[in-house]
Image (tube, rainbow, N blue to C red):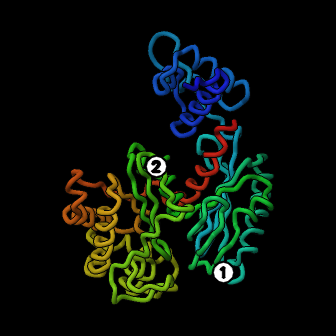
Amino acid sequence: MTVARPDEVRRFNRSSLLRLLHLGGPATRAALATELGLNRSTIKMLVDALAESGLVEERVPRLARGAGRPSLLVLPQPQAAVVLAVDVQVEHAGIALVGFGGQILGRNSWNLHGRQRQPAEVITHIAESATLLAADLGVRPVAAGVSVPGVVRRADGLVHDAANLDWTDVALGVRLTGVLGIPVVVGNDAELGALAEYARGAGRGAGDTVFVSADVGVGGGLISQGTLLRGAAGYLGEIGHMTVRPDGRPCHCGNAGCWETEVGEAALCRALGRSEHGPRGAIVAELRSLPGDGGPALAEYLDWLTLGLVNVVNILGPELLVLGDLFTALPDAAVAAVGGEVRRRSMVSRAIGGVRIEKSRLGADSKLLGAAEAAFDGVIGML
């Protein structure tokens, strides 16, 4: 039997405490001891060491009441460890510097049109924008996480295919690591959206969650028993390319009738009678002006959305489905009706007593926060 050395135990306890504060926010020593199953003297030793290194501070709660000395709160210090989060989308890109505890310290974004969408241009702009933002804030990121709408090889951040960006076999992770000089993790956008929802959004407390997002394309990310599933080489979650209509529209992937041809941005524009090249804001505004159930305009669109979600539930069996990006603009009553149909038509949902369907609570920040969490995953154990 292998017995852990005292220094290994201390490192494990330290990392566990840091991760709990990073994800859960401020907590008293007593609460930390209970959550981690450690005695108070061990917690005191850990917190004192972390405070001395500047990773946490202790403070009297603002609303402390009652007799006696109030319990001090242990708070993560955002600027003690900062990561760069990058969200590359089809029409624009954004960056944020995110501190320990998940606080966004600053951000910047820019449009991607024509030549600006080429990998070299995107990499250069990320590096320049990150340098300026870090200088303005007086911080230095120690790692980076990058979200990309495509098929990404987890091991080295190779973007195998990002069709809507017209990228093929782009060594994004290696190239950004060389330019930024810090470790870089690259992930599929829906995968990182799932990670963000599980850590900080609608998926908190749900062990089995599927995040389904609609942008130009449709993608999914899966949390199973609290762990992000990545598939072979990191290729998982291309649910937008399951065939739902064999005689349907051609898809850029080479198939016909893929789910994203029926529920992606172009399909939503067709349902609303809008140009597929119109501004995203106009689509969102019109969706929010529709009747509660979506009215006749969305009837067929919602049928296809329901069909795809039934397949997702039957195959993956989640307790929670989180809808992101354009799906969040759908009328609440329409989403509720879709949820009722999914529960009625899915055998797995009936077997497990129903599946919840909710909109993302993180909005446009889901991919940025997911990218930050991917970066922090390799940082916290080193603090």
- Mark found first going from the N terminus, 2 or 1: 1
Q: Is label 1 in a helix, a strand or a loop?
A: loop
Q: 74 or 234, which is in the foreground?
A: 234
Total numbered labels placed on residues in the image: 2
In the displayed structure image, the side of residue 143 where residue 240 appears, left or right? left
Q: Name the residue nearer the viewer: 304 or 271.
A: 304
Asked if 10 appears above or below 196 in the picture, the reply is above
The residue at 40%/68% (across/down) is 327
Q: Which residue is mark 1?
A: 113
Query: At 59% across and 70% down in the image, what residue appears?
Result: 89
Q: How many angstroms separate mark 2 from mark 1 (CA)?
A: 32 Å
Tell me which residue sits at (54%, 32%) in the image: 26
Nearest the viewer among 94 and 258 is: 258
Q: Which secondary structure, mark 2? A: helix
What is the three-letter code of the residue carrying label 1? His
Which image quarter is the N terminus in? Answer: top right
Which numbered mark, 2 or 1, is in the foreground of this view?
2
Q: Residues within 10 Å of mark 2 (few under 14, many from 20)?
A: many
Q: Residue 334 placed where, x, y %?
A: 28, 68
Residue 177, above or below 206: below
Numbered circle sitting on residue 198: 2
Decide if residue 263 is in sight here: no
The answer to which image quadrant residue 164 occupies is: bottom right
- For this orientation, the residue located farthest to the front is 1
For image coordinates 25% across by 81% down, the residue present is: 296
Image quadrant holding the C terminus, namely top right
Image location (x, y in percent) of residue 260: 42, 77
- Amino acid on which the number 2 mark rests in the picture: Tyr
Q: How many other residues sit within 10 Å of disc 1, few (<14), some (14-19) or many (≥20)? A: few
- Residue 202 shows up from this direction: yes
Quarter-wise, where is residue 144 in the image?
bottom right
Place of residue 62 in the rendered image (x, y in percent of width and height, measured from the top left): 54, 26
